[in-house]
Image: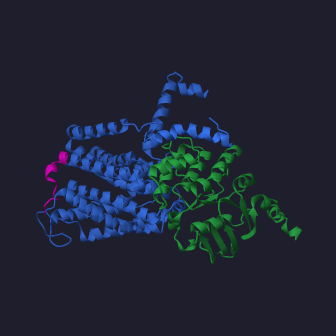
Amino acid sequence: MKTEASAPAAETAATSQGSALAAARAGRRLEPRSMVRPAVIAALLACVLLFVPSIFSLYYVDAWTQVAIYSIVTLGLGLLVGRVGMVSLGQGAVLAMGAWVSARLLFATGLPFPLVLLAGGLITMVLGTLVGLPALRMSGLYLALITLMLAGAITVVLQNINFPNGGHGFTGYNASTVHIPPIRRPAIAASDPAFFRYSVVVAILMFLLVLVHLRGRPGRAWAAIRQSEAASLAGGINTTLFKLWAFALASFITGIAGGLVAGSFRYLNSLTFSTADSITLLAVVLMGGAYSMTGAIVAAFLLKFLQALLNDWGVSPDWLTILFGIGVLQVLTTAPRGIVEQMPKDLARLGRLIRGLLGRPTTTRESAE
Amino acid sequence: MISVSDLTVRFGGVTPLDRMTVNFERGTCGLIGPNGAGKTTFFNVLSGFVRPVEGTVHAFDEDLLKMTHYRRARWGVRRTFQTEQAIEELSVYDNVAMIHEHSKMTGGSRREDVLGAIEFVKLDIDPYAKVGSLGAAQRRLVEVARAVVGKPRLVLLDEPAAGLPDEETALLGDVIRAIPEHMGALVILVDHDMSLVSHCCEVTAVLDFGKLLASGPTEEVLRDERVIRAYLGTEEIAA
């Protein structure tokens, strides 16, 4: 309804707008946040936890474990790229640091696995935030390049000191060891299926951690920074603090993922991680959809499950690189919000097309004509 | 009350503000001038994006220029930009709450303040609707709500009605007029729409080439021959 701008009409305006606002004031939403979505997600996760290990062979259970672990990494990168607008090509190296720190702690200490994960996450958080420091001065291509160079530098360092294998000293590397002990796993998750479940649970916790951030003060500040740094400064946001906060959070969860990588591979060496991983990570994050949390899962699926599938079929993994290249081009030109948002639209379009071919005009077509 | 004296800004050989001296006392004050007169540069100085080479700005007896930009917002400076900056990804509520949680000037609970600001700008919509789903006029109102939430002291509105049809501009004008009384802030309004300026502002200052050309009651200022000449660009002929 339209209200006149005159003074007497102001009162009627106040009562008419009471509808939406009064409801909000009373703590109700006009459209209450549906509980269906969380319930469906919880049910899906329960199915995954229960049935994946029994349906799939050990080979694919391991692939799903990698999907769970890498979804944490893509979640972190998606946070930086999609939510804050900082393109980092250094997350692969941050993951490697997390794996290194956790592997070292697992060999050197008798700490329980969850504590090692936490400590690895915290140490990686400090190191990863250092990688993010250039973001305070640079953005866009320059930030991407400098983080890529830092990733390269970290990879070189890790190649030279190598990953811990149970030796003595700070690095824990002993080249002459004949019998190399595997990296310790938690007692409750010694077998592969159990470790799969363990990884999924940790991933769920990390997703919840990020969700809490996105729903709260940091999430709002990040959205403001992504839209306009000047406007967020004018709004009183300490952009330096919140950019570093984003890098800290992304590095923390990536560090946790690194600990899981150490536990799942059981033997790490410098070939496990390469600088190119960081670039591939960004490619799959863009394809999956950097703006949503589901996108992170799709990205991890593209990265790790497709890899396992092609491996199983005996197809060269180089095809995957080509596929990702085409995929990124496709996404950037036609679906900037990634597969998670494009797929439902395309399926709906396909559905309409098929119904059209079958000769049954749909309601949407009728209304369009 | 904000008093500006001898404010000078230089970008290389260009001097967008040239020893500008003006006082804004209270209420809603207009700031007008032809394109390039220095209005937005003046706002950028107030919000801390541009550092002047000379001059002082005292707002409510505090030296504004000494504060870093995000601290000015906490102290109570709010602004809108020529291009609308409401955040699409967030709901109306979150857009306003975001400004509130970074301001130190809060009175009641966040919920009350935020919903109060949304109500004040007469936005009759679900506060949990995403800003991306709103029309241009509603987004402008969200921006105004962001500018008035949580007891600001100084509200700078940079062409808030740009691109709006007359009917919606009039509604926006009513909201802007009510800010000083309801929110207790000093408002400076920059706009090219003279009917909006005369509707909202009792006093108006006119900038031309970075200098104060005239200031005083809006009606008199708009009738001032020098002001008319500056807008029509016939100053040389008159001289």
Q: Nearer the viewer, residue A284 or A82?
A: A82
Palette colour of chain B: green
Is A302 left or right of B212, judged from the image as shown?
left
Prevailing SS of the magenta stretch? loop
Q: Is residue B168 magenta?
A: no
Is A252 left or right of B77, judged from the image as shown?
left
B140 over A160 or under it: above or below: above
Q: Which chain is blue?
A: A
Q: Nearer the viewer, residue A246 or B203?
A: B203
Residue A159: image location, x then y, percent: 28, 68
Residue A79: image location, x then y, percent: 40, 55
A269 over A70 or under it: above or below: below
Q: Please give the name of the residue rendered at 15% of the width and 49% of the height, measured from the top-left corner.
A: A188
Quadrant in which residue A47 is drawn:
top left
> Can residue B83 be seen from the camera position used here?
no
B120 over B27 or under it: above or below: above
* Extent of the magenta region: A180-194
Q: Nearer the viewer, residue B183 or A21?
A: B183
Residue B226: image location, x then y, percent: 82, 66
- Residue occupying the far bottom of the picture: B54
Is B120 left or right of A85, judged from the image as shown?
right
- Residue occupying the far top of the picture: A360
